[in-house]
Amino acid sequence: MNSGTNLPPRGASRQAYTAPANGRRFRWGRFFFILFFLVLLAAAGFLAYLFFETKGAITDMSTDNNNGEVTVVPQDQSVKVKPTAMLLLGLDNRKETGSMNTDVLMVAAFNPETKSAVVVSIPRDTRIELDGFSSRKANQYYSRFLSAAREKDGLEGIAAETEARNEMKEMFGQYFDIPIQYSAVINFKGFSDVVDALGGVEVNVDMDMRYRDTADGTDIDLKAGFQELDGNQALDFVRYRKSNNGTGESSDFERNQRQSQVLGALTDKMKSLGGVAKLGSVIEAVGNNMTMDMPSKEIEALMTTYFGIGKENIQFIPLEGTWRSPYVYPDETKLSEAKAALRAKLAE
């Protein structure tokens, strides 16, 4: 008689004894397969939900929303297969100041074959000197082009904005010796909304930052150290320059480095499991605050082609130079290196 559960019945073969264990493994394998299937089903449902929920936001930020027509890009010219350059403009259009300066300027080159990018950030005070364009600070051109489109060309609304964007793409394309196909304009509110949609961003604040200006509502108060920032704090972090309370001031070059740090951290967070779950909210935040001169189908193609890209796949190049009030004069060697990196990415 068997007195213990760990011993086989008297006379039972080893094969008969081990069969129940195999049965349990079979049942567990079946359970695991069903669980895996349910996970895939849930993921498919989430992606479908995300697609339908965000399609309106994508349309809102695209050129389709401007003219009510869907532009079809030839397949061989799509961002899915062709390297693309884009001008990224962060617009400071706070109602307190009435400013239309683009205090964040970046040129990005994307390559779909390598799923990688080069992003060059341009100090806002960089003096741009090009044939056919008057010399001024980099961040002043968009507002000047917009004013000229309205006052000289008699354009209004989206038509004036489109003209200003085209001038910006032509100018910076000439500056970096590359063709720039598209542009994106996002206001500062959009930046903070994206950070909040992701639940904050972790960065290393490189110095104590304190600056208050009652005229435009600025109230920056950050302590040095690695920490998680909400949307408004992250915006303060990348904008900080002046101090009026004993903390050190900051240069445009340091601001560009902070912008690259935050963009890298946001990129990594968006491809994490938690970030993917919040992607719908991120797209909604962007759609409410950004416009692109790109058809909605191409925006969708851009998102799907580069989904999952991490900061290790992005080369950030802050353009360097020398500050001589009131301009930053770019270092010609560094500028040549930035041009070469952009051209190389488009040629991969």
Image (cartoon, helix red, strand yellow):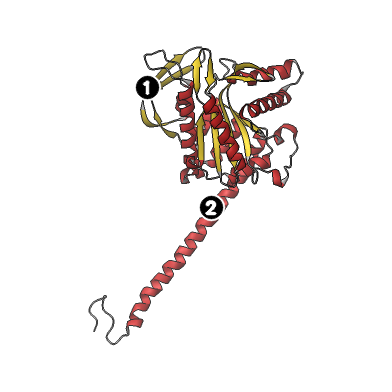
Instruction: Find residue 114 and name its label.
Output: none
33 relative to 187, above or below = below
154 relative to 81, above or below = above
Q: Quadrant of residue 88?
A: top right
In-image side of 104 versus 236 (left or right): right
- Asked if labels 2 and 1 touch by Cβ distance under 8 angstroms, the answer is no
Disc 2 on helix, strand or loop?
helix
Image quarter where the C terminus lies is top right
In-image side of 67 versus 214 (left or right): right
C-alpha span from label 1 to label 2: 43 Å
How many neighbours does mark 1 have within 10 angstroms: few (below 14), some (14-19), or many (20 or more)? some
Give 257 or 29, whichever is nearer the viewer.
257
Horizontal and vertical percent position of residue 303: 59, 42
User: Mark 1 = which residue?
Assistant: 208
Give 282 or 272, whichever is nearer the viewer.
272
Instruction: Find residue 43 and name its label.
Output: 2
In-image side of 328 versus 204 (left or right): right
Q: Quadrant of residue 151?
A: top right
Horizontal and vertical percent position of residue 43: 53, 52
238 relative to 268, above or below = above
Q: Nearer the viewer, mark 1 or mark 2?
A: 1
Image quarter where the N terminus lies is bottom left
Residue type of the residue flagged with mark 2: Ala
Disc 1 on helix, strand or loop?
loop
Residue lying farthest to the right in this orientation: 154
Q: Earlier in the sequence, mark 1 or mark 2?
A: 2
How many neighbours does mark 2 have within 10 angstroms: few (below 14), some (14-19), or many (20 or more)? few
Residue drawn at the location 42% of the way across and 15% of the way down: 243
Residue type of the residue flagged with mark 1: Asp
